[in-house]
Image (cartoon, helix red, strand yellow):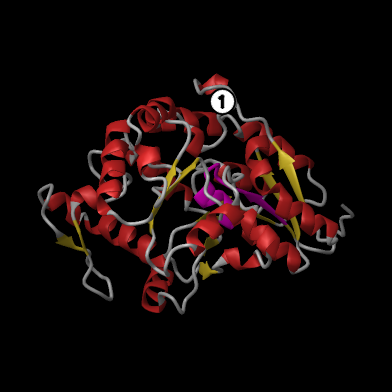
């Protein structure tokens, strides 16, 4: 890639989790489309998830490139080659994953020192809590990225600062103070960083501390969607918050849309053909995302409920966690055979 030093040079460092990774990559592609030099730094497995789209941008002569760092999975007690959160065999290993991330600090700093032209700005995920140290040493302004909406950020901030959740019982609903609308939660509905009994409290403190010294934050949302919440959150952050989404709109053609993230294991045309065989809005779609890990007994109950519903359905069963136990049940119980006329099972990643 020919580098023109008169252009601004932005370095993007995404967190290794689909919901964090893909929006920041989309933002990088949007910046490159606006005549900015963009360097994305990540690990080999994560780079493979978005390389197709970036390679097309490179072929279009955009100034965007990807640099890879080895992820020290084994050194942190993770299975070898485990470079993404959705590949963790158990969420109990998240502390190991963050330990592996912290080992990237020295090689990442070295890489940034060697980059030409020198970066004008770092955009990094909030989970890289030590990026402030590197940015300060290298005197590079940094901007935080978090894929959540202004509504979510504002709720988290107001709950955290008011500590309203610390004065109620487990199942008692409480109203979030300082919001434009009446919004209620229970303690059990709060994310880990706000739940007093969660082991994410220490990480949350580090993330909040890491915000100090950042130039600002970008949010993958748009003001027309949540005008009052964006305005309130920007006020809290002294207006150093910019809504730049939805970043996914940079994927203009079907190839880009289909190639975002992990490769689907089921043919897209087969899914569409199956859907077209049913009346509009009649099919139940069941998918719990890349991070939720239901136990095999829970999945079996869900499957039996889908069978009892007598409704057509698509059920996405993620790979990895206790997959063999689930596959054994599907085969021996005869579930897949019984529902084959009105149920489509997708193993792994569904076509996007």
Relative placement, left or right, of 123 versus 296 is right
Relative placement, left or right, of 239 versus 44 is left
Indicate yes or no whether the magenta region holds residue 36: no
Place of residue 132 in the rendered image (x, y in percent of width and height, measured from the top left): 56, 46
- The segment highlighted magenta reads 10-23
Relative placement, left or right, of 173 versus 212 is left
Place of residue 267 in the rendered image (x, y in percent of width and height, measured from the top left): 60, 49
- Residue drawn 27% across the image and 51% down it: 190
> Pointer 1: what residue?
73
Place of residue 323 in the rendered image (x, y in percent of width and height, measured from the top left): 43, 29
Secondary structure found at label 1:
loop
Q: Is residue 22 above or below residue 80?
A: below
The picture quadrant where one finds residue 215 is: bottom right
Residue nearer the viewer, 136 or 250: 250
Q: Is residue 267 above or below residue 257?
A: above
Name the residue furthest right: 2
Residue nearer the viewer, 150 or 118: 150
Whether residue 335 can be seen here: yes
Whether residue 64 can be seen here: no
- Residue drawn 49% across the image and 68% down it: 221
């Amino acid at each position: 890639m020919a580098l023109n030093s008169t252009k601004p040079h932005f370095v993007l460092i995404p967190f290794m989790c689909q919901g964090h990774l893909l929006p920041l990559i989309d933002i990088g592609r949007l910046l490159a489309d606006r005549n900015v030099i963009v360097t994305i730094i990540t690990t080999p497995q994560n780079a493979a998830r978005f390389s197709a789209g970036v390679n097309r941008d490179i072929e279009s002569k955009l100034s965007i490139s990807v640099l890879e760092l080895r992820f020290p999975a084994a050194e942190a007690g993770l299975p070898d080659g485990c470079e993404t959160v959705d590949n963790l065999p158990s969420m109990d290993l998240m502390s190991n994953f963050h330990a592996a991330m912290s080992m990237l600090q020295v090689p990442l700093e070295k890489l940034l020192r060697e980059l030409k032209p020198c970066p004008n700005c770092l955009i990094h995920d909030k989970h890289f809590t030590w990026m402030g140290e590197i940015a300060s040493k290298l005197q590079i302004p940094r901007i935080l990225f978090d894929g959540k909406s202004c509504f979510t950020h504002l709720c988290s901030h107001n709950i955290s600062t008011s500590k309203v959740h610390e004065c109620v019982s487990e199942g008692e609903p409480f109203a979030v103070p300082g919001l434009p609308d009446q919004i209620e939660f229970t303690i059990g509905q709060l994310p880990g960083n706000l739940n007093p009994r969660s082991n994410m409290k220490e990480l949350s403190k580090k993330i909040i501390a890491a915000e100090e010294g950042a130039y600002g934050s970008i949010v993958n949302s748009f003001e027309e969607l949540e005008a009052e919440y964006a305005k309130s959150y920007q006020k809290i952050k002294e207006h150093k918050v910019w809504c730049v989404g939805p970043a996914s709109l940079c994927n203009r053609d079907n190839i880009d849309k289909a190639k975002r993230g992990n490769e689907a294991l089921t043919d897209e045309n087969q899914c569409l053909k199956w859907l077209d065989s049913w009346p509009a809005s009649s099919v139940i779609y069941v998918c719990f995302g890349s991070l939720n890990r239901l136990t095999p007994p829970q999945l079996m109950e869900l499957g039996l409920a889908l069978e009892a519903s007598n409704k057509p359905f698509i059920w996405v069963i993620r790979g990895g966690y206790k997959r063999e136990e689930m596959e054994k049940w599907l085969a021996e119980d005869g579930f897949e055979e019984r529902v084959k006329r009105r149920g489509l099972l997708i193993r792994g990643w569904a076509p996007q």
